[in-house]
Image (cartoon, rainbow, N blue to C red):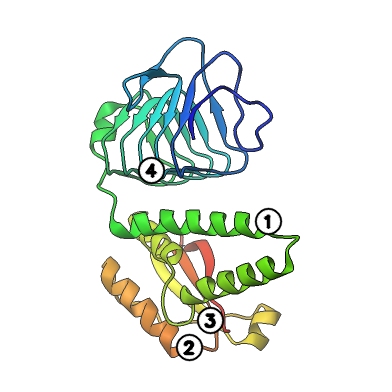
Amino acid sequence: MGPLLPDPNHPALRSADEGSPFYIGANTNIQDSVVIHGLEQGRVSGDDGQAYSVWVGDNTCITHLALIHGPAYVGNNCFIGFRSTVFNAKVGHGCIVMMHVLIQDVEIPAGRYVPSGAVITTQQAADRLPEAKESDKAFSHHVVAVNQALRAGDRCADDVACLTQWQTSAHNNYAKGNGGSLSAEAMAQVRQQLRQGYRVGLEYADPRRFKAGSWQSAPALAATQEAEVLAQIEQFLAAHPGNYVRLLGINPRAKQRQFEQVIQMPE
């Protein structure tokens, strides 16, 4: 997109008038209710060597309700999760920042993963962040693809032929992530639960029980390593193609479930 001046009327991009210019790179996805704000003082150096209040690189996704508060730099191929804040900071190329994160007064090295809820306000904490894994990147790509598909549906809403083609494509893409194999989003959620120290469980229901809200507990997952857990979940999905299946994150100390998400729906 290139250099931008603040535009308070943009549906996704909101800012004060004092900070400019902004740079938004090619193929970057800025979702609803994102705030990009610049101050009169403070600049970052863009990849072109020029000074910017906010620089957002190419092929990056800034998701719903995120705040990018200048001076700030977000590199290429990054993902900034829902309700996360980047203030007076630099996020290097290829970083995956999950939900409800605060990044302030630091530089995040390229290719790092920032877990949900993290508060990164010292350079020592930034340098300790783990490398982003391929499945983390797959999750971010999945979110972007869903958002782009929804936008495509909006754009052709008045064209019956276009809308029919979009609905068919969207259904096929959704089905690929269900019915025997885990979607990228579900894989990322499994990883997130394990990283938080939670146990992962499954529940299932046939269509009749699903309508009644009556779920059955699946056998406990014996595995604790990520790859083994994912393999066991996929085996269960393959064995129950006609059932709804939902993923659980369970806090073993409190003996309470902290997370629920349906990961398979029968065709």
Would you name the residue on which mark 4 appears? 78
**Residue type, mark 3 in image:** Tyr
Mark pair 2, 1: CA separation: 34 Å
Q: Earlier in the sequence, mark 4 or mark 1?
A: 4
**Residue type, mark 4 in image:** Cys
The residue tagged with tag 3: helix, strand or loop? strand
Q: Earlier in the sequence, mark 3 or mark 1?
A: 1
Left or right of 94, for residue 7: right
Residue depicted at 53% across the width and 16% down the height = 19
Q: Quadrant of residue 57?
A: top left
Would you name the residue on which mark 2 appears? 240
Q: Are marks 3 and 2 in contact (CB under 8 Å)?
A: yes
Pick the residue in front: 55 or 164.
164
Disc 1 crowd, CA 10 A, few/some/many (<14, 14-19, 20+): few
Q: Residue 50, position in %: x, y?
A: 36, 18
Mark pair 4, 2: CA separation: 36 Å
Pick the residue in front: 253 or 243.
243
Mark pair 3, 1: CA separation: 33 Å
Disc 2 crowd, CA 10 A, few/some/many (<14, 14-19, 20+): some
Give the numbered dot on residue 204: 3
Q: Are marks 3 and 1 in contact (CB under 8 Å)?
A: no
Image quarter (top left, top right, bottom left or bottom right) of the C terminus: bottom right
Would you name the residue on which mark 1 appears? 154
The residue tagged with tag 1: helix, strand or loop? helix
Q: State which mark lies toward you, 4 or 1.
A: 1
Mark pair 3, 4: CA separation: 35 Å
